[in-house]
C-alpha cells in the first residue's frame, strides 16, 4: 500500500471531522463568496492547523482562485490541495545519511512513541542492507533500555546500553566507539523524554550533542523531534521548546491515525519551518512512512 492509501486510511478521523463540511463548501462554491472562505478557515482551525496557518492558506487560495478565474467547486478543491501541499513543503525532507557512520539523535517527551519509531526506522534500514547500531541513551526511564533491546533484536540491529541511571553521554561515547569498530552505517540514539521544564535534561542533551561533535565531527547528523499528533497544539509548544535547545533537523509525527486534528502537520511546518520527515499511521513497521506533502494534502481534501 502506497503513501496516499496509507495516509488516507490513517487520516480517517481527521477526514471525518473535516470532509463533510468541506464537501458542502466546495460543492456550493460559485465564485467570490466570503462565507466560503470564512467557513474554510474555521474548519482548518478546528483541525488544529493553527490560526496564522489557516489564515495564510485561505489568503493563498483566494489569490489563486482570482488569478485563475475559478468558478466551480472541483477546480477550487484542486487549487486548495496545491495551496496546502505548498504550505507543507518546507526544508529538506530527505534524511542526510551519506557518511559512514551517520548519526540520528532522537528527541522528544515520554510517551510520544520515540523508542518504537527508532525500532521501525532500524528495521527499515537493515532491510535496505544497512548496518545499524542503536544506542540506549535513555537511562532515565525504567525499562527503556530493555524495550530498545527488543526492537534491536527484531530489526537485526546492534545495540549499546549501560545500566539504568548511567550517564547518557557516556553511553553515546561508547556507542560511537562500537559503531566505528564494527563498521556501522547508521547510529540511532534514543534519549530520555525531556520535558521542556526540566533544565537538567536539556543540559544533558547539549552534553550528548557535544560528544557527537567531538567524536564524529565530519559525520552526517540528523536530530529528529518525535511528536504525538494526538496532542495537537501541545505538540507545537513542545516543538518550539526543543527547537530553542537542540538543532532540530526534522519532525517525526506519530499516531496520526489516532487523531481528528491532523491539521497540526500544517501548523508544525509553517510555524517552525521544519520539515516533517516521517509520519506514523499505525502499529506496523510499514506504517512509518517518509512524508509526502502533495499526497497528504490530497488524502485530506479529496472525497
Image: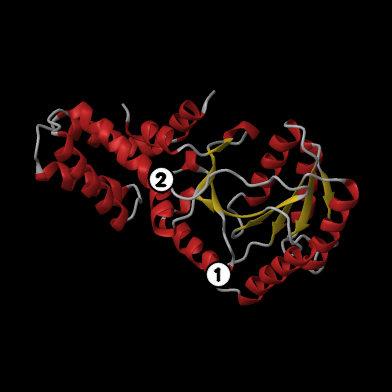
Q: CA distance from mark 1 to mark 2?
A: 25 Å
Mark 1 secondary-structure assignment: loop
Can residue 254 be seen by looking at this rendering? no
- Residue drawn where x is 30% and y is 41% of the image: 83
Frontmost of labels 1 and 2 is 2
Depth check: 202 or 259 in front? Answer: 202
Give me the residue at 48% from left, 48% from top.
229
Nearer-N-terminus badge (1/2) = 2
Q: Is residue 203 left or right of residue 251?
A: right
Query: What is the number of the mark on residue 88?
Result: 2
Can you name the residue that lies furthest to the bottom here?
Answer: 199
Residue labelled with disc 1:
196
Q: Is 142 left, or right, of 83 in this rendering?
A: right
Compared to 36, does 213 lie above or below?
below
Residue farthest to the front, as pictured: 218
- Which residue does the image show at 64% across and 45% down from the upper left? 117
* Quadrant in which the C terminus appears: top left
Amino acid at each position: 500500500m502506497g503513501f496516499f492509501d496509507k495516509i488516507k486510511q490513517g487520516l480517517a478521523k481527521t477526514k471525518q471531522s473535516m470532509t463533510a463540511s468541506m464537501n458542502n463548501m466546495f460543492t456550493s462554491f460559485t465564485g467570490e463568496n466570503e462565507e466560503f472562505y470564512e467557513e474554510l478557515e474555521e474548519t482548518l482551525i478546528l483541525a488544529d492547523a493553527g490560526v496564522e496557518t489557516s489564515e495564510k492558506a485561505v489568503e493563498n487560495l483566494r489569490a489563486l482562485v482570482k488569478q485563475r478565474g475559478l468558478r466551480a467547486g472541483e477546480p477550487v478543491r484542486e487549487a486548495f490541495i496545491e495551496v496546502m501541499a505548498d504550505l507543507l513543503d518546507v526544508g529538506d525532507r530527505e534524511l542526510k545519511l551519506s557518511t559512514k557512520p551517520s548519526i540520528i539523535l532522537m528527541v522528544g517527551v515520554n510517551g510520544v512513541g520515540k523508542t518504537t519509531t527508532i525500532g521501525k526506522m532500524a528495521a527499515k534500514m537493515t532491510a535496505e542492507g544497512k548496518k545499524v547500531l542503536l544506542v540506549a541513551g535513555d537511562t532515565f526511564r525504567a525499562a527503556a533500555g530493555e524495550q530498545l533491546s527488543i526492537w534491536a533484536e527484531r530489526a537485526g540491529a546492534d545495540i549499546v546500553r549501560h545500566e539504568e541511571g548511567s550517564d547518557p553521554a557516556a553511553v553515546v561515547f561508547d556507542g560511537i566507539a562500537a559503531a566505528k569498530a564494527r563498521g556501522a552505517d547508521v547510529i540511532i540514539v534514543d534519549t530520555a523524554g525531556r520535558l521542556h521544564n526540566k533544565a537538567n535534561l536539556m543540559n544533558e542533551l547539549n552534553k550528548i550533542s557535544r560528544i557527537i561533535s567531538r567524536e564524529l565531527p565530519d559525520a552526517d547528523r540528523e536530530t529528529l523531534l518525535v511528536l504525538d499528533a494526538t496532542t495537537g497544539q501541545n505538540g507545537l509548544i513542545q516543538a518550539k521548546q526543543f527547537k530553542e535547545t537542540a538543532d532540530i533537523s526534522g519532525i517525526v509525527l506519530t499516531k496520526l491515525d489516532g487523531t481528528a486534528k491532523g491539521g497540526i502537520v500544517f501548523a508544525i511546518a509553517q510555524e517552525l519551518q521544519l520539515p516533517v520527515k516521517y509520519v506514523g499511521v499505525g502499529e506496523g513497521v510499514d506504517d512509518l512512512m517518509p512524508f509526502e506533502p502533495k499526497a497528504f494534502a490530497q488524502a485530506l481534501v479529496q472525497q
